[in-house]
Amino acid sequence: MMQLPQTGGAPDWIHLLPAGRFAGKDGRGPYTTPRNPAALMAASMRAAGGKLTLDENHSTDIAAKIGLPSPAMGWITELQPRADGVWGRVEWNATGHSAMDNRSYRGVSPVFDHDAQGTVTLIRRAALTNDPNLLDLHTLHHRQETRMDLAELARRLGLPETATQADVDRALDAARAASATSTSLHSSLGTLVGLGADAGTDAILAAVRASVEGGQANTQRMQAMETQLTELRQQGARRDAETAVDAAARDGRVISANLRTELVSLHAANPEMAMRIINGLPKLPQGQMVRHSNGDRSTTVDLNGADATAVAKMDAAFGVTEADIQQFGGSHGAV
């Protein structure tokens, strides 16, 4: 729970949500603050018309419902992501200043919505209170479950809107497998900077920078963390590249082993350019194959009795010249 100043005076910023997972002392939860809360903060300010109410003892949710007064103590006019969660800048009114000067309240309790998985989706308002519920910020919370349809889930996975449930399941399995390879590194980085194992790369980097700016770390540590974070991003880009290139090959695009290596490297650096090249490669009809050799390079494609013109196209696709065929004894149609 955030402790308000005990020496009097109203703070400019108050802690509204903790980073990562948190739960209520009454057993409800766990809940999760998104790793990148930018969308959450924007939606919250938009829903509140630019100012979130800061009342006392959740009077907006309790007293106002039965016609009793529910005056604001101030207004949260800005939200800010920090390494330890989401903070709000408060524009206090006279009543709020008086409460702070008199040290009337010691905690802040936000009211928020969350989806079925417990991820916070909207910060509604906050209250000054001495009897909070959450273990971390002790907040009153309202449950608002949301359901994600197949098209939206496909979009978030980078799939077309026409993706089937099977496509989504495969993408989720691939994402889980890729995530497993980097979980250990994420966990160690998060622990190193004082965050949980669920902390994202942006939160970790923010924590490192905050430590450096506050004199709590040194330049060497910052550089080491930056390097590890860069490696994580590069690993993710290469996995995405291999998935895209292999999918094109399964779809019939003519991609040799050497070409695959080059396309994977290009896709990791420039996905759009790589896909333009891949989409321009020859595409074989389904079920047709021919064995085509050039030195130590061999590819099998079944053309079901294709004529010399089809074979010539294969030669052109692989960059095989007549001189290559004479020199290496290239064979066509032999399995």
Image (tube, rainbow, N blue to C red):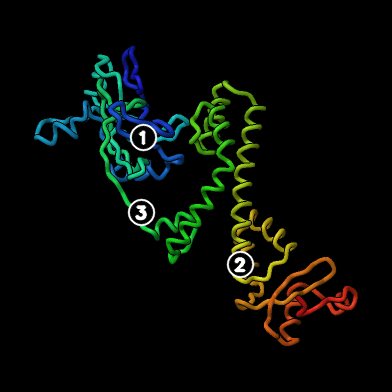
- Pointer 3 with pointer 1, Cβ within 8 A: no
Residue 88 visible in the shown view:
no
Q: Is residue 103 above or below residue 81?
A: above
- To which quarter of the image does residue 188 belong? top right
Residue for badge 1: 30
Residue 250 position within the rendered picture, expressed as x and y whole percent measured from the top left: 61, 67
Residue 225 position within the rendered picture, expressed as x and y whole percent measured from the top left: 62, 33
The quarter of the rendered structure image containing the C terminus is bottom right
Residue 148: numbered disc: 3
Nearest to viewer (mark 2 / mark 3): 2
Residue at the image point whose x is 45% and y is 54% from the top: 156
- Label 3 vs 1, first from the N-terminus: 1
10 Å crowding of disc 2: few (<14), some (14-19), many (20+)? few
Residue for badge 2: 250
Q: Nearer the viewer, residue 238 or 167?
A: 167
Q: The disc labelled 3 sits on which kind of residue? A: Met
- Label 1 vs 2, first from the N-terminus: 1
Task: Identify the secondary structure beneath mark 1.
Answer: loop
Q: Is residue 310 above or below residue 206?
A: below
Task: Identify the secondary structure beneath mark 2.
Answer: helix
Q: Is residue 44 left or right of residue 221?
A: left
